[in-house]
Image: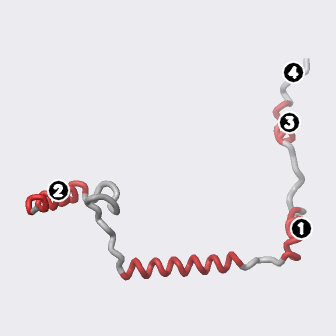
Amino acid sequence: GRKRRKKRRRRVTIRYLVLSEFVGLQWIGKHRQPRFITPLIKANTIRNLETEAENQYWLSCPYMTKEQEYCHDEKNGAKFPEHRYASEYLKHLHVTKKWADS
């Protein structure tokens, strides 16, 4: 009884002093250190859930209607330059390559 409790208390105290933190999983096992729910933790959780609900609401509302979305990408696609192959960018490297022609 008492000796075990003293040993356990001593072991936990020494571990805390040496490591300044508990090693392993603190939430399961024989010597678990459960985290108590404080009012601050509750308030933070509620705030995070409200933020998530607001994000879900705004993501559920479409930004454009189907009619607006129909040719939207084609209008913006006209702003892009024409496609060029890599060989067009690198053809200046073949200027001095005379040994390949013979």
Is label 1 in contact with label 3 (beta carbons under 8 Å)?
no
Type of residue at label 1?
Answer: Lys
Q: Within 10 angstroms of label 2, few (less than 14), some, or many (20 or more) residues?
A: few
Sequence-first disc among 2 and 1 = 2
Point out which mark residue 91 bears.
Answer: 3
At horizontal 35% and vertical 79% (from top left) the residue drawn is: 38
Q: Position of residue 32 (x, y in %)?
A: 29, 62
**Residue depth check, mark 2 versus mark 3: number of the one nearer the observer:** 2
Sequence-first disc among 2 and 3 = 2
Whole-angstrom CA distance, mark 2 to mark 3, is: 74 Å
Q: Secondary structure at mark 1?
A: helix
Q: Which residue is mark 2?
A: 11
101, 53: nearer the viewer: 53
Q: Position of residue 29 (x, y in %)?
A: 31, 58
Q: Which residue is mark 1?
A: 75
Q: Which residue is mark 4?
A: 100
Type of residue at label 2?
Answer: Arg
Sequence-first disc among 4 and 3 = 3
